[in-house]
Amino acid sequence: MHQLDAYLAELAAALAATPRDPLDDIAWALWETYRRDGTIIACGNGGSAASASHLACDLSKWTIHEGRRRVRALALTDNVPMMTAWSNDTAYERAFVEQLMGLYRPGDTLVAISGSGNSPNVLRAVEWANEQGATTIGLTGFDGGKLAGLARHAMIAPSHLMPLVEDVHIAVCHGLAVTLGAMIAEEHLLFEPTRLRTQAA
């Protein structure tokens, strides 16, 4: 049990050290996407693929409030036939961008999740989305990789251990879904980025 206790202590420390200002900006970007009736599109590989699907689920379900328009969210990781077709017929690094090219509409936001920040298929999707003028969000770890400099908004989980990075990401995704749901319920501008934390205090 000692190892489990040590891991949980490291996770608590990583969550406490997670930078809050980038999260304020990301929460606001998701709110702005909702306000302009855009779709939040997520992608990632491996554990980050699960996080992308989980985020899309929570954004779609946890944010529901009677009388309010629902959030549109989807994950490019959920269509396995499409992913494998593009990977087989072109290259694995095209698995997300080719889907995105068919789904993206002006006003949509891409959430790219990569622990290392260097997954080629994630980077290709962000590059293309940036070219369209889309809002792009990167959740990464370690030193941020290429994703941290490529995404318009980026949050780097403060760890060099992949399980901890992924745990921080899923906690952040939960927090973002809960926050967006609260913003939709309130439906006013009390949640400007510099005031997100003071509202919760």
Image (cartoon, rainbow, N blue to C red):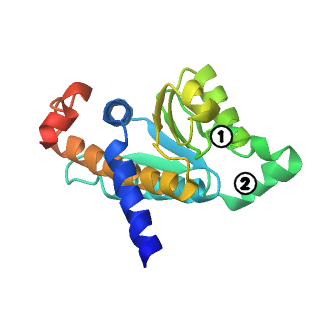
Q: Quadrant of residue 171?
A: bottom left
Q: Name the secondary structure under disc 1.
A: helix
Q: Is residue 175 left or right of residue 79?
A: left
Question: Is 55 placed left or right of 124 in the picture?
Answer: left
Return the residue found at the far front: 2
Up-down relation of residue 45 to residue 117 (above or below): below
What kind of element bears circle 2?
helix
Q: Nearer the viewer, residue 22 or 78?
A: 22
Residue 175 in sight from this viewpoint: yes
Side of 102 relative to 37 (left or right)? right
Residue 104 x, y percent position in the rendering: 58, 35
Using the image as rendered, state which of residue 28 and residue 23 is in the foreground.
23
Of the two numbered discs 1 and 2 in the rendering, the one whose residue sits closer to the viewer: 1
The residue that disc 1 covers is 122
Residue 20 — which label? none
Residue type for callout 2 = Met
Q: Count neighbours of disc 2 (C-alpha within 10 A) and say few if under 14, some if 14 to 19, many if 20 or more.
A: some
Task: Write down the quadrant of residue 148 in the picture.
Answer: top right
**74 displayed left or right of 26:** right
Q: Residue at x 42, y 66 (%)?
A: 6
> Tag 1: Cα neighbours inside 10 Å, few (<14), some, or many (≥20)?
many
| Residue 1 locus on image (x, y percent) | 43, 79
Q: Residue at x 65, y 27 (%)?
A: 127
- Nearer to us in this view, 72 or 16: 16
Which of the 4 image quarters holds residue 194?
A: top left
What amino acid type should be assigned to the residue bearing mark 1? Val
Q: How much space separates mark 1 and mark 2, taking CA atoms?
A: 16 Å
- The quarter of the rendered structure image containing the C terminus is top left
Question: In the rendering, which numbered label is found on residue 82?
Answer: 2
